[in-house]
Amino acid sequence: MPKTFQLETPRLLLRRWQETDRAPFAAMNADPAVMRFYPAPFTRQESDESIDRYLAAFEREGFSFFAATLRETGAFAGTIGLQTMRDAVPNLPQPAVEIGWRLTLDHQGLGLAMEGARAIVDFAFRQLALAEVVAITTLANHPSRRVMEKLGMTHRSELDFNHPRVPSGHPYERHTLYSLHNPNISEVSCSTPL
């Protein structure tokens, strides 16, 4: 895989991770307000392990979650991208490719998640020729669900599930799934192997 990679939007640069991203990524993941829909904020080690997984995934698959920075200033804004799901969602053929985003508190509510997610969907469907992308979140994460809906994703309530990495009985254990089909590929659904 190429060592350099980037996608540009009007306000964002989505690119491969650099060593200088580790500290701001860890700070974002340690912020209880950013992580309010997760069971707990991440430790520095968990954040570093996430970046290591993203880098390895890019080498292996040609996509991952990317660092999102502001084009104008270079400021770290968060992460937006794709990943092959690590955990099996019941009744969803695997492997499934998930689109997701997480932004620093200062960069939330500005339309950046939507802007970056649109670029990632275009990349997924045009360059990677993926048949479908899915997104998951806790039922209570209405801001993320709004982004999914604005992307044109379909809520698949029949595929809602208890997330295997969320403690049993936790308020955020129950997750919901949305899917988006590549319009260039016909007859694909969450019930059809990818």
Image (cartoon, rainbow, N blue to C red):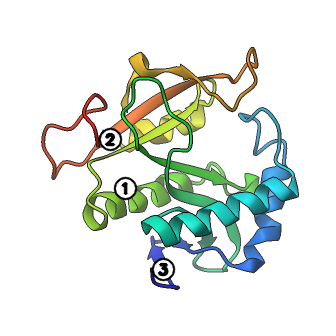
Q: What's the residue at 36%, 36% (across, down)?
A: 179
Identify whether 58 is placed above or below 34.
Answer: below
Amino acid on which disc 2 is placed: Leu
Task: Find the residue positioned furthest to the left.
Answer: 186
In the foreground, 108 or 176: 176
Amino acid on which disc 3 is placed: Phe
Q: Are marks 2 and 1 in contact (CB under 8 Å)?
A: yes
Quarter containing the N terminus: bottom left
Q: What's the residue at 54%, 53% (across, down)?
A: 113
Name the spot of residue 146 as percent of width and height, x first: 49, 36
Residue 77 in sight in this render:
yes
Mark 3: few, some, or many residues within 10 Å (few <14, many ≥20)? some
Disc number for residue 20: none
Mark toward the viewer: 1 or 3? 3
Q: Quadrant of residue 129?
A: bottom left
Q: What's the residue at 76%, 19% (across, down)?
A: 170
Mark 2: few, some, or many residues within 10 Å (few <14, many ≥20)? many
Q: CA distance from mark 2 to mark 3?
A: 24 Å
Residue under label 2, please give it: 180
Name the spot of residue 117 as percent of width and height, x first: 46, 55
Q: CA distance from mark 1 to mark 3?
A: 16 Å
Q: Is residue 172 left or right of residue 121?
A: right
**Of pointers 2 and 3, the one earlier in the residue sequence:** 3
Q: CA distance from mark 2 to mark 1?
A: 9 Å
Identify whether 127 is placed above or below 85.
Answer: below
Disc number for residue 121: 1
**Of pointers 1 and 3, the one earlier in the residue sequence:** 3
Residue 67 in sight in this render:
no
Name the spot of residue 180 as percent of width and height, x first: 32, 41
Q: Is residue 3 left or right of residue 34?
A: left
Q: What's the residue at 64%, 61% (across, down)?
A: 53
Residue under label 3, please give it: 5
